[in-house]
Amino acid sequence: MKKLVILISGRGSNMEAIVRACAREGWPAQVAAVIANRPDAAGLAFATSHGIATAVVDHRQFPDRDSFDAALAQVIDGFAPDLVVLAGFMRVLTAGFVDHYAGRMLNVHPSLLPSFPGLKTHQRALDAGVRLHGASVHFVTSQLDYGPIVVQAAVPVETGDTPATLAERVLATEHIIYPRAVRWFVEGRLALDGLRVTLTPPEPQWLFAGHTAGEGA
Ligand code: GAR
């Protein structure tokens, strides 16, 4: 039985999707804890109501990133996780923290990486005029929003899209691909070779959330 620790900063809808998929699909895994860096993170209530241990490590109580990350790692390691799952965890992490969880920490990011790392990805995608946007699940490295990609979802940009409408469709794909990636990890099916992630036995490491050309005619 693999142990998961999920880190959130707010709403926690990706955490919720993972908790639900783990139970529904009977993964060989258990969500040992949900940890937030904000006491008011809405997702904590969902975790508590599902009998999952919660903890808060409030970044505002620490003078710098190193001391916050050290305290956070101590709390995480208290649950002895096999995998750390960043699910809307909005903190830049130190290289020491990232190295400590090398190969055992995943993140979801709302863009087709390596395009649009950082914040306001939906606005930036619209401004850049891309026709395909999306979401990526990747292993975390010390470079922000960059690392071996496990699975991506492509979402067509529609005429009239706003950051909000685009975000909604992208988030719906995150709720599909993130549980899928975590399940692959706990099933021991992922292998890393540099920036490449292979899945054994193979299945598509992508999702296309739109109409294919010519469809609907
Ligand atoms: C998600 O869209 C996630 O991709 C994004 O924050 C949102 C969290 O939603 N993460 C990042 O931007 C990380 N760089 P949630 O709290 O409902 O899962």
Image (tube, helix red, strand yellow):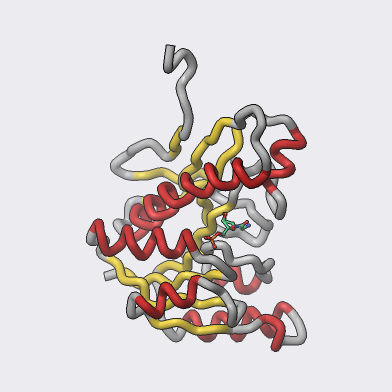
**Above or below, 141 relative to 37:** above
Residue 68: percent from left, percent from top: 66, 82
x 32%, y 58%: residue: 21
Q: Seen from this angle, which residue lies furthest front?
A: 160
Residue 75: percent from left, percent from top: 51, 85
Residue 90 seen in the current view: yes
**Above or below, 79 relative to 104:** below
Q: Quadrant of the N terminus?
A: bottom left
Count of number-bearing discs = 0
x 71%, y 54%: residue: 119
**Above or below, 188 relative to 72:** above
Tell which quarter ligand 1 is in: bottom right
x 33%, y 39%: residue: 202
1 lies left or right of 9: left
Q: Quadrant of the C terminus?
A: top left
Could you say which is closer to the camera, residue 183 or residue 163? 163
Residue 193 seen in the current view: no
24 lies left or right of 9: left
Determine the image quadrant of residue 25.
bottom left
Could you say which is closer to the camera, residue 147 or residue 166? 166
36 lies left or right of 116: left
Could you say which is closer to the camera, residue 182 or residue 195? 182
157 lies left or right of 53: right
x 75%, y 81%: residue: 64
Residue 136: percent from left, percent from top: 54, 47
Residue 11: percent from left, percent from top: 54, 66
Could you say which is closer to the camera, residue 136 or residue 201? 136
